[in-house]
Amino acid sequence: MYLEKKWFCLFFCLLFSGYTIAQHQHEGLEKEILKIISYNSYFDKELTPGFIITVVEGNTTSYFPYGSVNKETADSLSAKDIFEIGSCTKPFTALTVIDAVEKGKFLLTDKVNSFLPSAYQNPSLADLSVEDLLLHRYPFPKRPSNFGLKEKETNNPYKYYTKEDLLRYYSKLSDLKLEEKSSYSHINYALLEVILEQIYQKNFGQILEEAIFRPSLMEQSFIASTTKDITQGYNKKGYKSKPWSYSAFSGSEGMKTSSEDLSKFFEHLFYNKEWPLKDPIKIQLSKKVESIYNDQFYTGYGWQIINQKKAHDIYAMTGATDGHSTFIAFVPETATAVIILSNSSSGTRDLGMSILRMINYNWKRKNAK
C-alpha cells in the first residue's frame, strides 16, 4: 500500500521536525524508515492520526514522529507524550516480581494460594506457583468468565471489575492443570498484582514506581495519576476514546508511559552496568517455554519470544486499549530496540518488526560490543 501524496509530504515534514527532539540521529535511518512506511507497511493510515517511532541502538536513541497528536491539530507527537500501553505492562510487572524475589520477598516456586486470604484459596490449584503465572503455564481463559457481568461500559471494560471479583472467580476454578506449553491470559498478571500488593502492603502503582520507574529514571510513567495528561486516543471506528480505568488488572494492562521513558529503560538495559535492575533483567531474559501457538513462539517472564533459530531471539510485546496501541521489540545481543506508540487502537501492524529487521541488517547484525 503506497502513501497518498499528501500523507507522504506530511510525513516527510514531520519526520524532520523530529530532529528537535532526537537525542541523536542515525545517518540515513530516517530515509530507510520512510521507505518502509511508504512501500512496505499495511496499517490503516486513515484510522491512525499519529504515532511515534523510537529506535534504540545501544546508547543512541532516535525519535521519529508521524502524523499529528490528534485530529484537530497538525502538531506532531513528542517523545514526552504519554500513552496507555495495555498488555505491554506485563513485562514490567514480571520484572517487579523477579526484583522482589531477588530481594528475598518470596520465591518463584511459592504457591499462589499462600498469598491469598483463606476464603479465596483454591484446593484445585494447590500446585499453581508464582512462576506458573509468569509463564502462563495453566490454561486460564483470557479473561474471567464473570467479567462480562461487570462490564458496564464497553469502552472502559475493566473499570468495575474488582480484585474481590477476581479472587472469587479464582477460588471457584476447577479442572485446570499444568500444561507443557504456555497459553496467554490476562488473569495471570492480575493475580501477580494481588501478590505484589500483599507482599509490599502498598498499591501496585507505588510498587512499580519504587521498583521500576525511579531506578530507571522513568519520570513520565505511572499506573494512576491526577496530574499527568494522557494523549488523546481514537478507537477502531475513528472516534475519540477515554483512558481505561482499573479496579483490578493494572498489572496486566494498566501502565502509562512515554517514548522517552521507554527508551531510558532500554538504554539502562543495554549499557548501564550500575542499574539496580541489572541482575533481575538477566533472570527475566533467561527463561522461555514453548507456547501453544507454533514452534517459533515462546513465552518468557512477561515477554513473548520469537525463536529465529539461526539468528538471535527477538523479545517482543504488543498492547492495545480502546484508544492506543503499542509495539515493543528488542534483541539483547545486538542492543537494538524498536518502540511504536500510536494514538489509535488500530495500531501499525508489522511496521515495528520491519524496522527492527532493518536495523539488524536482516538479522545478520553481530553482537554489540
Image (spheres, helix red, strand yellow):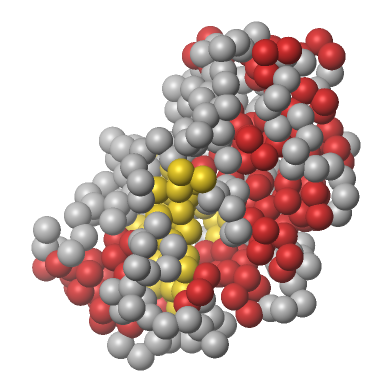
Left or right of 210? Residue 25 is left
User: Residue placed at 61% from the left, 12% from the top?
Assistant: 173
Q: Is residue 363 above or below residue 295?
A: below
Looking at the picture, how far across and down is residue 283, in whole percent? 67, 58
Name the quadrant of the C terminus: bottom right
Task: Name the residue located 69 percent from the left edge and 78 percent from the top edge.
Answer: 272
5 left or right of 120 in image: left
The image position of residue 73, as x and y in percent, is 36, 58
Quadrant (top left, top right, bottom left, bottom right) of the N terminus: bottom left
Above/below status of 145 relative to 46: above
Residue 47 seen = yes
Q: Quadrant of residue 111?
A: top right
Query: Which residue appears farthest toward the bottom when viewing the image?
Result: 27
Residue 22 seen from this side? no
Q: Position of residue 30 (x, y in %)?
A: 31, 80
How many numbered discs?
0
Q: Farthest residue to the front: give it.
A: 180
